[in-house]
Image (cartoon, rainbow, N blue to C red):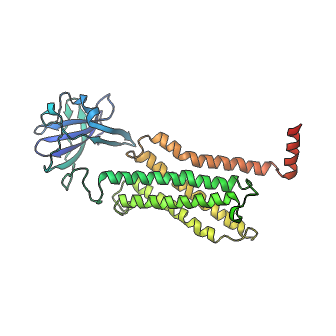
Amino acid sequence: MCHCDSQLKCIRFLEGLDNVIECSALTGQPLSMKFSYNPALRNARIPGEETIRSQYFKNETAVISDGMMYCAATVDVSGWGPSNGQVFTYKENQRYFLLLAAGSAITSGLTQHSTTAVSSSRLLTDYGAEGSTGLSSTVRKRLIKAHAILMILAWFFFVPTAVMFARFLRASWPTMKPGGLLIWFHVHRTFNTIAILLSIASFICILTANSWEWTGPGSQSSDWGKKHTMVGIFALCLCWLQPFISAMRCNPAHPRRQFFNWVHRGIGVIAMILATTAVCIAAVHFLGIWPHKISQTTLSLMPLVVLLVMSAVFLCIDKFIDVDELNLSKMCEKKRY
């Protein structure tokens, strides 16, 4: 990408007349997607093209983040009659190749890009057709969204709820013991089990979407994609380790029970921090899934922040306020008077 007043990235459909879909920011104007075309060895604007952009580019996302330009949209490829073929028109059984290039943009058109460009080695097929993953793009996007939704439900609803019952509601409903166990333990165990099942389902969704290919270090994924993969896998491994550790817990009266408690809590806290980090990476850097990164990052951090604040408050209460049956009865008597 050129570091100049106006920037662009464009895709050319090689078919004789080069139709161009560009993502550019002209001087003083916001970044947006546009149509243009290449007559011979130059680029030209299409008269009146600005009037059809909102109609032909749906669900558009065009942002510059961390020095990188990101543009995505669902493009209507039915063509535009007044353009005389200058706006890309998809034709069945026509051979197409994609050329991706970066350079600078001016009001009259795009300047000639550098000699460095990327051309597709495969024919451009219909977006509804199966790609290299064996899945259509629509199915793949749905699997990725399902992965995100299931992980958020698991880590930011079921896990925090299980933790809150174990940490703050142990003394609640002391006389209710279904199956001989207190309510807090039933909720803690059940919600954590649901979270584990959801995380497994989410993991299968993203593996299926990526054709069961590795996306961590050593793959062709982006740097943040690799980091998201590794942080997420560590969080899942710790999450899936917890049931086995719990199965080996000793009796509450055993002298080593405190050791188990701290290990169990420590692993849970580390897993929660890693999971929150993985979701924040997705919220900030995966703009195709999380278009509103500030609000999504804030929402992602809220469950962990709430848990930390409540833990600090209850820790202070336990440390500095002596609440026993005698004090409780005295407080009740004072309220009566």
Is there any visible trace of residue 223 in the rendered image?
no
Residue occupying the point 49% across, 40% down? 295
The percent coordinates of residue 178 (x first, y second) are 69, 62
The percent coordinates of residue 163 (x first, y second) are 63, 55
The percent coordinates of residue 32 (x first, y second) are 30, 35
Residue occupying the point 64% across, 72% down? 248
Q: Nearer the viewer, residue 96 or 126?
A: 126
Is the N terminus in the top left, top right, bottom left or bottom right quadrant? top left
Q: Quadrant of residue 287?
A: top left
Count the marks: 0
Q: Nearer the viewer, residue 95 or 195?
A: 195
Query: In the visual, does 156 lie left or right of 281?
Result: right
Residue occupying the point 19% across, 44% down? 12
Is there any visible trace of residue 126 in the rendered image?
yes
Query: In the visual, does 269 lie left or right of 216?
Result: right
Residue occupying the point 33% across, 38% down? 60
Q: Nearer the viewer, residue 65 or 314?
A: 314
The percent coordinates of residue 233 (x first, y second) are 47, 61
Is the C terminus in the top left, top right, bottom left or bottom right quadrant? top right
Examine the rendered structure and indicate whether residue 148 appears above or below residue 59: below
